[in-house]
Image (spheres, rainbow, N blue to C red):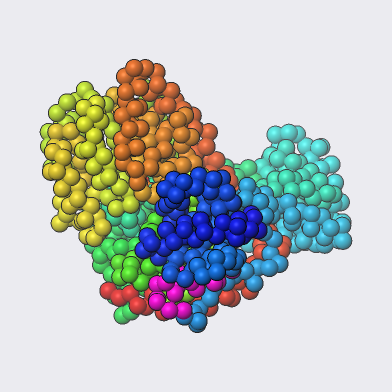
Amino acid sequence: MFDQLRLFCTDNREQITGLFERFMRLDKMFLLKSEIWDEFTLYCQEHKQQRLLKSPMAIALSKTQEISVDGEWLYMAIRPRVARWHYLRYCYQDGAITEVDVAEFMAFKEKLIQGKYVEQILEFDLAPFERDFPKMTQSRSIGHGVEFLNRIFSSRLSSALTGGDELILSFLRVHGYNGQPFMINDRIKTVRALRNALLEGVEYLQSQKTETEWPEMSEALRNIGFEPGWGRTRGQVEVGFSRLADLLEAPDHQNLERFITAVPMIFNIVVLSPHGFFGQENVLGLPDTGGQVVYILDQVRALEKEMKERIYNHGLDIKPQIIILTRLIPEAGETTCNVVEEHVYGTDNVQIVRVPFRNEQGEILPNWISRFEVWPYLERFAEEARHEVLSRLGRRPDLIIGNYSDGNLVSYLMAKSLGVTNCTIAHALEKTKYLFSSLYWKEMEKQYHFSCQFTADMIAMNAADFIITSTYQEIAGSSDVVGQYESYSSFTMPELQRVLQGIDVFDPKFNIVSPGADEYVYFSYGDKDRRFSEYSSQIREMIYGPPHPEGRGSLAEQEKPLIFSMARLDRIKNLTGLVEWYGQDEELRNRTNLMIIGGVVNPDESGDEEERAQIQLMHELFDRYELDSEVRWLGVRLDKRVTGELYRMIADAGGVFVQPAYFEAFGLTVVEAMASGLPTFATQYGGPLEIIENGNSGFHIDPNHGAVTRKILVDFFRRCEEDPAYWQKISAGAIERVNARYTWTLYARRLLSLTCIYGFWKFATNLERQETNRYLEMLYHLQFKRLAEGIKH
Ligand code: UDP
Ligand code: LCN
């Protein structure tokens, strides 16, 4: 592509110069994808250069994500395929196009911001540390890291085993619980002895009745060299023995995965989620408190259930335990965030444990603070949290799961000091949420402290043993859109750091494991027998009742279907955008009512800057478009059973759900609404692009093009009027999609299996990445801590 482009530019210098001068005259230093393409097509039209539209320049520009420009030079960042980048430089003076490296591209952007080239800046680059580390090469493999590792390492393992390597043997030896060894004892000293023991073991098992359980066989098997953990029944133990025998004969990756995931390794898990209000009631919708809380509470329930089932099938009698560590907030309003310990409903042994944030003098911070301000408190929090965990479990946990940037950093610190497998989950990487968040970090620093956050992200992501993402697009985007993790591959924060390789999305640590929606709460409106009818009148009152004390607006024409949306009242959620589209569209107003749940209606009750601005804007829109009899806005926190029934009641009346965010990392409300059977219209930026198949299980909307979105909505309601089966079709498609792809049972199975496999490979290979970890430690101590100390309260 590049050679053709260069040739084309030489042969068509005049047109190319004209086009690039047009870019320059826009008087912007940085142009983004859609702008670049729009300007290019306009140029072709205005200069009657339609042939350019089929030229190598058109191909290059269609893949250009960004252009940086000044009076002398123009730099293009081209992404020809998912997660692959090339950088080109164009010189106005001689018309030459040259390919440059990422460092030069960054340096040029820094120059534009700072007004001069700055030679010396911290360059952060992980590539040299990872040269020998196996990486995937195909973009379709991204997010399937464990399969890749299994494939490449099982062939290595195969040759190691033929050479008499004792790897499997030593791996089996490390397992046990509270002094009780599992799997094998020291009667088995070599691989050959293991093979013989397995043969002898199978022979013995075949002499036993099918229903015989481990305790009856334990003595005989112990004498051969086996300890508990192989299974509860004779049949299970035999399967385990045969699998291992097969594996020792010829390790293929599927067999290996099956065997490793059946080894008892996970009894205790620690989950970290410091920021926001983490609680089980009265919290959803408060600032920084949304899907992550819902995700974790559903996650731990599913994990505990799966752990119990696995432990039972291993033939062990151990009660698994999960601890969620969050922040203790003494002034916690109507929440329980001031309580040190809370049992998680619907579980046997899962606790929320709260540890405070302390200032330098050791005093406890009394109030909620924004997720953007937590950085100076995390190291101390990690230290206290570690003591808490050790004293409660009496041992190290088997897995630490970090959530969001702060939780991931704490999990990094804890896993490092405890030597435990560490998994991180981003939920929402802020970098792609805010335009130019790294380039203009300085301007945003006071409010957002992205210098800390992006540095913390790089440390935690690179130190994690494995990373779970909810979708593929979260890692690597799509052919047109840059992925959230991909945005960390290279970027610059002028005057602070230039990142040449921050994260590599081809790293096999990435695995897509999608969350679900609690199936006991979010199920189809058509499932009449399961409905929570006890809430019907309360919900009817909520929707159609007179003005609500914590709301604004009451619906005058109750027979119209509802457009519903619910989210935290963050700017990015764009609930105000939806209200504005509605206000502007007469037909939509005639055909439907709008209901919004989010935030609080009184700005004085909000402690969050962004939320206050949104509340004010919402009131302005009500006034400007006179919406009080067509839009109902409630600033309430609902129990999730009420929410579930609310979705369904809106579906009963032919309504829809709209998720209008400028960007949504995943979007649990989207999955909840779809599971309830609501036709769902959700942003095309982020997770919903992958959750919804446009036109089948819902619709994508573009929050930046309100008029188009309004038309999509109006067309839908028109079509439903002509053909009511259309609503049913989309509703059924939504339910089907969620059932097939987004369930917590699938999630828990996968997460536990990943923990076993990464644990094994970490033990068996050099997955430890010691060099990388040493480098990250420097970044933590010399860069992150210094930045964090700059934030004071
Ligand atoms: N939610 C709620 N009340 C609100 C706002 C949100 O109950 O006022 C719940 C919603 O049902 C969903 C979660 O909070 O379970 C929001 O998750 P999502 O992934 O959609 O967005 P996030 O808030 O995490 O960005
Ligand atoms: C955070 C978000 O912003 C949402 O998009 C996700 O659905 C949620 O976390 C759960 O991962």
Q: x%, y% of residue 597?
A: 25, 42
Quarter of the view holding residue 445: bottom left
Question: Is residue 483 in sight in this rendering?
Answer: no
Q: Report the side of 395 relative to 164 (left or right).
A: left
- In the image, residue 111 sits, relative to residue 9, either above or below, namely below
Stretch of the chain drawn in magenta = 101-117
Query: Foreground residue, 197 or 667?
Result: 667
Query: Foreground residue, 334 or 19?
Result: 19
Q: Report the side of 505 relative to 333 (left or right).
A: right
Q: x%, y% of residue 512?
A: 56, 48
Q: Report the side of 438 relative to 600 (left or right).
A: right
Quarter of the C terminus within the rendering: bottom left
Q: x%, y% of residue 578?
A: 28, 41
Q: Is residue 778 magenta?
A: no
- In the image, residue 316 sits, relative to residue 167, either above or below, namely above
Quarter of the N terminus within the rendering: bottom right
Q: Residue at x 38, y 69 (%)?
A: 441
Q: Residue at x 57, y 49 (%)?
A: 55
| Number of marks | 0
Q: Residue at x 16, y 40 (%)?
A: 625
Q: Is residue 110 magenta?
A: yes
Query: Foreground residue, 711 or 778?
Result: 711
Q: Report the side of 86 relative to 296 (left or right).
A: right
Quarter of the view holding residue 675: top left
Q: x%, y% of residue 405?
A: 44, 62
